[in-house]
Image (tube, grey):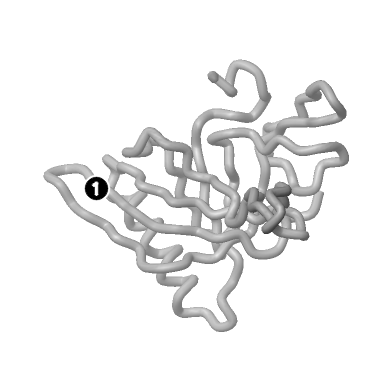
Amino acid sequence: MNYAAVVPGIDGSIQLQLGGLSVTCVDFRTSSYVRQPIEVASLQYSAAGSSVSTGPLYPWKFVWEIDAAFTVAEEVLALDQIYTKFQDTRPHPNVLVVDRNRPLIEDTPRSRGIASGGSEWSLPASQIAYPALFNAHFVGKLRIDERDYSWAAQFILQETDRVLP
């Protein structure tokens, strides 16, 4: 689905911001979506054969597995600076993730901040969609591979506390 045609503020990008630094990822090397819930509901069965739904008792938190391509050296440098600033600061600061790749869909009222230039899109059943803001930490290492005059960067971000509306 082309979310950009429906939800204002969706342009297919993910922007990271930390301490005056910013980088925007717009070219993803994998076709799968990058934001997923950390834990999801599952179905198990009791000894008597009854189905039992399990899952987190708290609102969803998300993880981003990003495999991005860059053609501008300054963009890769900005990503590396953000990662280094995150690793060198104690306690680790939150990285602001502006997710304009796919809207966050949830029941009203909105639970997170909204990206600048974005707005809520009303859906049936008292739900909304919007480009959301998230706080996250890097988990794992930043990998940057140079290929001729382009770069590939792989990293994982995990949501921390919410950016309140």
Q: Is residue 81 above or below residue 60?
A: below
Q: Residue furthest top?
A: 5
Q: What count of labels does the image hold?
A: 1
Residue drawn at the location 35% of the way across and 44% of the way down: 68
Residue drawn at the location 78% of the way across and 31% of the way down: 128
Q: Residue furthest left?
A: 148
Q: Residue furthest front?
A: 48
| Side (left or right) of 108 relative to 92 | right
Pick the front one: 88 or 39: 39
Dividing the picture into quadrants, the one containing residue 9 is top right
Residue 96 in percent (x, y) is at 60, 56
Pick the front one: 69 or 71: 69
SS under mark 1: strand
Residue 35 in percent (x, y) is at 53, 45
Location of the N terminus by quadrant is top right
| Side (left or right) of 91 relative to 66 | right
Residue drawn at the location 34% of the way across and 54% of the way down: 154
Dividing the picture into quadrants, the one containing residue 87 is bottom left
Q: Residue furthest bottom?
A: 90
Residue 14 in percent (x, y) is at 51, 43
Residue 113 in percent (x, y) is at 75, 47
Q: Is residue 119 above or below residue 156?
A: above
Question: Quick one: label 1, few (<14), some, or many (20+) residues within 10 Å?
Answer: some
Q: Amino acid at mark 1?
A: Trp
Q: Which residue is mark 1?
A: 151
Residue drawn at the location 45% of the way across and 63% of the way down: 82
